[in-house]
Amino acid sequence: MYEDPYEVADNAELPASETWGELAVDAWFCVLQKGSKPVPFNPQIHKVEDRRTQIELNIVPLPEMGLSFSTQRKMLSESREWAGIVWQSLKDLGVKSVREVNSKWTRVELVSTGRTYEKDGVKKEATTIKFLAVFDSEDACRAAYLAEHPNRANTGNGNQAPQQASTTATAQRQPSPSDQEKATALKFLEVLVAQSGGDEAKLASQMVGMPLITKFFAVQSPEVQAMLEPYRQPAAPF
């Protein structure tokens, strides 16, 4: 389909600092160890006063956004980032418990934490998630998104406006909404597999509450097992 570059310029948008999509939340007790990532809290070996709570947020965007990555953040519940920004924004929306927003559809923006860091010799500003809205369903989230971004109505897989196909053959070559949705789910599944480090149990817990993925895939699905296979290869002998 031909696109007019002038029309594209007329409808140009800045890169999204917002994400509209499905939220997955994971919370677990941990202990901080110098020079390493947080490790699971073990009451047999760790002191209770050293226990902290790790919060992990993952937002899979609506297909209409055209993004191939999710918005993720990890933080301690005892941090200003969580208590003063992320959780505060949820409480401002009337949320009473973190559990109630798991698997909800949300609108978020990235805001400054007030902290800076250096990467590759460049000073950068750290950002975190601020919740702007919580929706009860994917349809409600999509409707709100398209109300603000009507030019995205024919992208992704949801509620597309009908288009007149030039020929029957052209129409047959177009991927179905189901195919597009499955392809999107597969991309996000690749991210989850990498995050899990090949751990099937962790991957399964990450997939729970993410119907975009579980609609098409389970841990035992051939596609998932193929992604996990490299993690099972024995280490090469020295």
Image: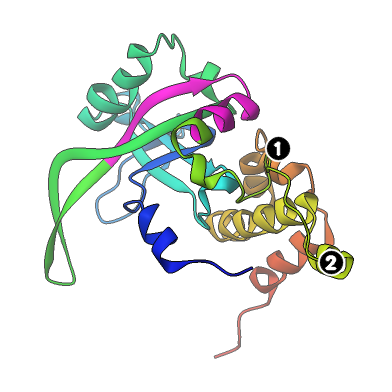
Please give the count of numbered marks on the rendered protein. Answer: 2
- Report the front residue among 1 and 45: 1
On screen, 153 above or below 182? Answer: above
Q: Quadrant of the N terminus?
A: bottom right
Residue 131 within the segment the image draws in magenta: yes
Q: How is the image coloured?
A: rainbow
Q: Position of residue 224 (x, y in %)?
A: 75, 60
For image coordinates 53% across by 54% down, the residue present is 66
Amino acid marked by disc 1: Pro
Q: Which mark is residue 211?
A: 1
Q: Nearer the viewer, residue 35 or 28?
A: 28
Q: Is residue 207 above or below residue 102?
A: below
In the image: residue 121, left or right of residue 154: left
**Mark 1 touches mark 2? (CB < 8 Å):** no
Q: Which residue is mark 2?
A: 167
The crowding category of the residue bearing disc 1, from other C-alpha atoms within 10 Å (few below 14, some 14 to 19, many at least 20), is few
- Percent of width and height locating residue 83: 27, 22
Label 1 vs label 2, nearer the camera:
2
- Side of 39 where 105 appears, left or right: right
Q: Is residue 89 left or right of residue 213?
A: left
Query: Residue at position x 39%, y 33% from top?
Result: 108
In x, y percent, where is residue 38?
37, 45
- Report the magenta residues as a range: 128-145
Q: Dot 2: what SS?
A: loop
Nearer-the-camera pick, 182 or 155: 155
